[in-house]
Amino acid sequence: MIKYNVADVHIYTEHNIIAGQYFFNFIELSTNMATNSNNTFFAPELYINNGVRDISFYKNAFGATENLCFTNDDGSIHVAELCIDGAIFHVHEVTSANFFSPAKNNGCTCCIGLFVPDVDMVMKRAILAGAIEINPAKDYEYGYRQGTIKDPFGHYWQIQKKI
């Protein structure tokens, strides 16, 4: 895992992504990032309220590992790259009027589908870690076992498996 304070990052290349007044080149900062691959993949960026310091829910609920984390001067999360069994996603504080956390509108625009070998075990672990059960796990006629939870930041996760 790589940890950076946002104010300490000053990398300038032709591939920089501008975030506020700071410059980041995520590819050079982490060899763990899947963007070094030539494969296409989907990596959602989940927005959280500004000031959040603890995102351990994802580790406790899903066994996520933290590849890198940028923090603000006050210790709050700016952006963190997390990975669940090779599937990368990011947790990011709100930095633009175009993006918002679920708390802003008391809802979210998508539900993250997480395919796992044991739906019931992951649902139980997520609830113990602080998630709210929205729909209990059950088998559906279309061949999936699914249950839905809401994480502590308001994001909905459909825990599922093809049966």
Image (tube, rainbow, N blue to C red):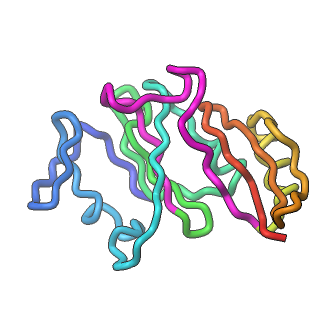
Residue at screen point 16% across, 35% down: 21
- Residue 117 lies, in percent from the top left, at 79, 69
Quarter location, residue 38: bottom left
Q: Examine the structure image and report whether residue 100 is included in the region drawn in magenta.
A: yes
- Residue 77 lies, in percent from the top left, at 43, 36
Q: Is residue 126 above or below residue 54?
A: below
In-image side of 69 versus 118 (left or right): left
- Residue 154 lies, in percent from the top left, at 62, 31
Q: Is residue 129 above or below residue 25?
A: above
- Residue 110 lies, in percent from the top left, at 56, 42
Residue at screen point 33% across, 73% down: 36
In-image side of 21 versus 112 (left or right): left
Q: Which residues are magenta?
A: 88-116
In this view of the protein, which residue sits in the foreground, 116 or 161? 161
Q: Quadrant of the N terminus?
A: bottom left
Residue at screen point 46% across, 58% down: 43
Residue placed furthest toward the front: 141
Q: Examine the structure image and report whether residue 129 is included in the region drawn in magenta.
A: no
In-image side of 133 versus 74 (left or right): right
Q: Is residue 93 above or below residue 121?
A: above
Q: Quadrant of the C terminus?
A: bottom right
